[in-house]
Amino acid sequence: MTTQYTDLDLDFTRHPGTGDVARIFNLSAIKNSMVNIINGKPFEKPFDEHYGTGIRGLLFTLYTPLTSIIIKKLITEKVELYEPRVSIIDVVVDSTSTNIDTNHLSLDIIYYVRDYGQQSLRIEMERLR
């Protein structure tokens, strides 16, 4: 029997039948949680100053090979700490699309979810002015 995971849709889409905020289930709920952790900044969540990776701030720095190592380590540590349903297999920083001039970052995260197997998540980040 597979476990069912539930979360709120943070786009605040209305449920057509009840009018409440719609719920998302299973893999969508897990991906939503991972995106929130990865995009989160330290001190952004009340009473938990360690939540979030803060990697969006790295878009304002010069990209070096060390930046990729820092990004991989932050994502692996924070996602496995705050999302216990997930085991990170690999984080790939796409250096071909990572451009210092455009401050753009592409990430491919390969992870394992019990009862659902290996999954992947692609995140594109861009600095906004």
Image (tube, helix red, strand yellow):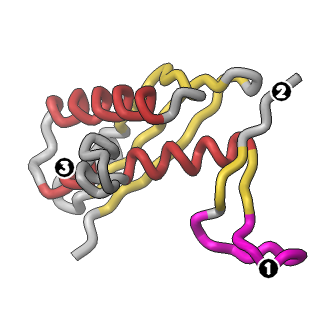
Do the residues under discs 1 and 2 have CB atoms within 8 angstroms? no
Q: Within 10 angstroms of label 3, few (less than 14), some, or many (20 or more) residues?
A: some
Instruction: Quarter of the image for the N terminus: give it.
Output: top right
In the rendering, at what x and y percent does residue 119 appear? 64, 31
Dot 1, how many residues are within 10 Å of its Cα: few (below 14), some (14-19), or many (20+)? few
Residue closer to the observer: 36 or 125: 36
- Specify the amino acid type for callout 1: Gly
Give the magenta part as a residue range: 10-22
Residue 84 location, x and y as percent?
Answer: 53, 27
Secondary structure beneath label 1: loop
Q: Tell me the kind of residue under disc 3.
A: Leu
Q: Residue at x 73, y 41 (%)?
A: 26
Can you tell which quarter of the image residue 20 is in? bottom right
Question: Is residue 6 shown in magenta?
Answer: no
- Which secondary structure lies at badge 2? loop
Q: CA distance from mark 1 to mark 2?
A: 28 Å
Residue 78: image tag: none
As displayed, is residue 9 above or below residue 41? below
Which quadrant of the structure image shows residue 45? bottom left
The Cα–Cα distance between marks 1 and 3, rounded to whole angstroms, is 39 Å
Structural crowding at the residue carrying mark 2, measured as other residues with C-alpha within 10 Å and reported as few (<14), some (14–19) or many (≥20) = few
User: For this view, does 51 lie left or right of residue 29?
Assistant: left
Name the residue nearer the viewer: 106 or 73: 73
Q: Which residue is mark 1?
A: 19
In-image side of 106 versus 114 (left or right) = left
Q: Is residue 77 above or below residue 104?
A: above
Q: Which residue is mark 3?
A: 58
At horizontal 19% and vertical 49% (from top left) the residue drawn is: 58
- Write down the residue under mark 2: 2
